[in-house]
Image (cartoon, rainbow, N blue to C red):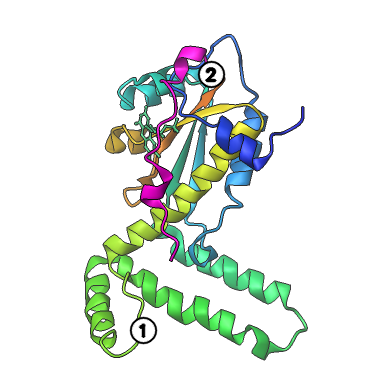
């Protein structure tokens, strides 16, 4: 089957709330789209995300329940749940450092010095801010320094949560566009009980669910009306 172009896939994608149970989707193809999700750009390439692919009837039913049984969850053939894992920052730094070293074996060490310093000094200092007090102190310092020079300000624990969610949401969009490219439908949902959902997925307390994505093949009535966007001129500023 020929895949859609990026523009075709973006236009095909709608939030589909009712899926056709007569038209199954292929779990392996959905998994492939999750792999494409992981090719999304991510802040400092830390990849502080995980993807839970719910495919068994039993778990689908349980997850739908904690999504208030909203139609996009209840009728979904499968559910994909991107999760933010800020707590994995040390492991991800180590993975980046290993990669940089192995990709540069035999090369001039000075060439990778900057990259190593970034992952071994700057990024750890930033991510220690995921501990609330350290983040708060760091933000005081950064605002003080910012009086005189260009300074990165988003260093509090709450800022880092946004950083994690930004990158994970980009991966989610990669996933949905990849699904659209093969004619599979999706619906992102933030209407769920995060505490119950985390318990179902056996996630640690520090993990945060970005969204739950319903997957399947649309029923015509599953698209709730024409697409609405505010006029482009209201959101576009050529500066
Ligand atoms: C982060 C996020 C959360 C959403 N949560 C829900 C939801 O809980 N239930 C739902 O039916 N749709 C949800 N939506 C879908 C939006 O309502 C939908 O994207 C919007 O109305 C535009 O329609 P379109 O996606 O068909 O272009 C969500 C979308 C996003 C991006």
Image position, residue 146 (x, y; %): 29, 84
Splitting the image into 4 quarters, where does residue 32 fall? top right
Q: Give percent across and percent down for residue 185.
A: 55, 26
- Viewer can see residue 105: yes
Quadrant of residue 112 within the rendered picture: bottom right
Q: Earlier in the sequence, mark 1 or mark 2?
A: 1
User: Would residue 207 be visible to someone looking at this image?
Assistant: no
- Quarter of the image for the C terminus: give it: bottom left
Q: Residue at x 46, y 50 (%)?
A: 168
Q: Using the image, determine if residue 17 lies above or below residue 37.
A: above
Image position of 194 with respect to 150: above or below: above
Specify few, some or many for label 1: CA neighbours under 10 Å numbering under 14, 14-19, or 20 or more. Answer: few
Q: Which quadrant does ligand 1 occupy?
A: top left
The relative height of residue 120 versus residue 13 in the rendered view (above or below) is: below
Question: In the drawing, what numbered circle is on residue 218?
Answer: 2
Q: Are marks 1 and 2 in contact (CB under 8 Å)?
A: no
Residue in view at x 39 percent, y 26 percent: 63
**Residue in front for this viewpoint, 196 or 8:** 8
In the rendered structure, which segment of residues is drawn in magenta? 219-239
Could you give the CA–CA distance between mark 1 and mark 2, rounded to whole angstroms? Answer: 49 Å
- On the rendered structure, is 179 left or right of 89? right
Q: In this figure, which residue is indicated by the disc labeled 1?
A: 150
**On the picture, is 98 further left or further right than 143?**
right
Q: Is mark 1 within 8 Å of ligand 1?
A: no
Magenta part, dominant SS = loop
Residue 111 part of the magenta segment: no
Quadrant location, the N terminus = top right
Q: Residue at x 57, y 38 (%)?
A: 10
């Amino acid at each position: 089957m020929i895949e859609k172009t990026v523009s075709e896939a973006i236009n095909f994608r709608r939030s589909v709330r009712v899926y056709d149970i007569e038209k199954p989707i292929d779990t392996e193809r959905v998994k492939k789209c999750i792999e494409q999700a992981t090719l999304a750009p991510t802040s400092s390439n830390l990849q502080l995300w995980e993807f839970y692919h719910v495919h068994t009837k039993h778990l689908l039913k349980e997850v739908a329940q904690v999504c208030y049984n909203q139609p996009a969850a209840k009728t979904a053939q499968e559910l994909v749940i991107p999760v933010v894992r800020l707590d994995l920052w040390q492991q991800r730094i180590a993975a980046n450092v290993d990669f940089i070293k192995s990709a540069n074996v035999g090369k001039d060490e000075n060439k990778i010095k900057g990259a190593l310093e970034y992952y071994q000094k700057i990024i750890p200092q930033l991510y220690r801010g995921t501990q609330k007090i350290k983040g708060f102190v760091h933000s005081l310092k950064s605002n003080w320094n910012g009086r005189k020079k260009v300074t990165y300000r988003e260093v509090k624990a709450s800022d880092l949560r946004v950083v994690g969610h930004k990158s994970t949401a980009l991966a989610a969009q990669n996933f949905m566009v990849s699904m659209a490219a093969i004619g599979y439908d999706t619906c992102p949902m933030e209407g769920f009980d995060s505490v119950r959902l985390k318990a179902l997925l056996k996630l640690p307390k520090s993990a945060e669910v970005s969204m739950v994505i319903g997957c399947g093949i649309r029923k015509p009535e599953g698209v709730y009306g024409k697409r609405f966007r505010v006029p482009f001129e209201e959101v576009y500023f050529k500066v």
